[in-house]
Image (cartoon, grey):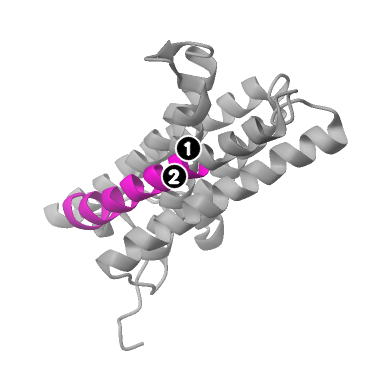
Amino acid sequence: MPTLDPGSPPGLRALFERRGLNATLGWVFVGVLCLAGVAAFGSRPLWAGFTFTLVALAVAPAVAFRRVDAMVPWEVLALASAPALGRILVIGQTVGGVTLTGRVTTYVAVAAAALILAVELDVFTPVRMTFSFAVLFVVVATVATAGLWAEARWLSDTFLGTSILLDGRPEHVIEESLMWDFVAATVAGAVAGVLFEYYFRRFADATPRYPIERRSDGD
């Protein structure tokens, strides 16, 4: 990581320290995601693949800009890490009849993936979204990711002989379960969209955390 001259102005030093702290915490959570992916690889390969997809999204700015401090807000990665750890630490536990490692963790993770993408577009590209479009974008991205996740489970059951989706239940039960999955994804996406707008774009003031010079609106 680049260093700062001891004689630099205090404001610049504070800015550098904020970038460094964000990058450090971000890479810590990338490490957590990697460990969770490795832990899930043997018993839940699809979930491991999804976890490593989150890792790829998280490190994309650092790779693209070739700077280790080009990292999305660490809070986003903390949110993405929570369901990955939940799959390991609270597997099988239920609250009020809801399996914590079912829709809850799955679609928090799916929404986190959409949130990472939205934050990266907003921070590292000239793309700027209105409030309504930002929420809609995250919702649509979350539902689209949920659709890809459903297809991945079906393909795994069909061609690899797993029983993730096609687990012996009647067809109408599986279809109803899928519809509830999409409902859960929509709700998670709406919450993530509002979180993106009101926290990451307004409260968190993410811009000073990054070393990337943005293009002005007229560029």
Q: Are marks 1 and 2 in contact (CB under 8 Å)?
A: yes
Residue at image position (71%, 19%) is: 43
Q: Which mark is residue 62?
A: none
Residue extending farthest bottom:
218
CA gap, disc 1 to disc 2? Answer: 6 Å
Q: Position of residue 20 (x, y in %)?
A: 33, 44
Could you say where residue 216 lies in the image, as x and y percent from the top left? 30, 81
Q: Check disc 2 and report its element: helix, strand or loop.
A: helix
Q: Is residue 54 above or below residue 218?
A: above
Q: Which residue is mark 1?
A: 107
Question: Where is residue 212, by image quadrant?
Answer: bottom left
- Residue in the image at 47% along x and 49% along y: 68
What residue is drawn where x is 38% and y is 74%? 126
Horizontal relation, residue 86 to residue 151: left or right? left
Q: Quadrant of the C terminus?
A: bottom left
Q: Amino acid at mark 1?
A: Tyr
Residue 111 tag number: 2
As for residue 188 lying within the magenta part, the answer is yes
Quarter of the figure with residue 135: bottom left
Magenta segment range? 182-204
Let me know if residue 116 appears in the view: yes
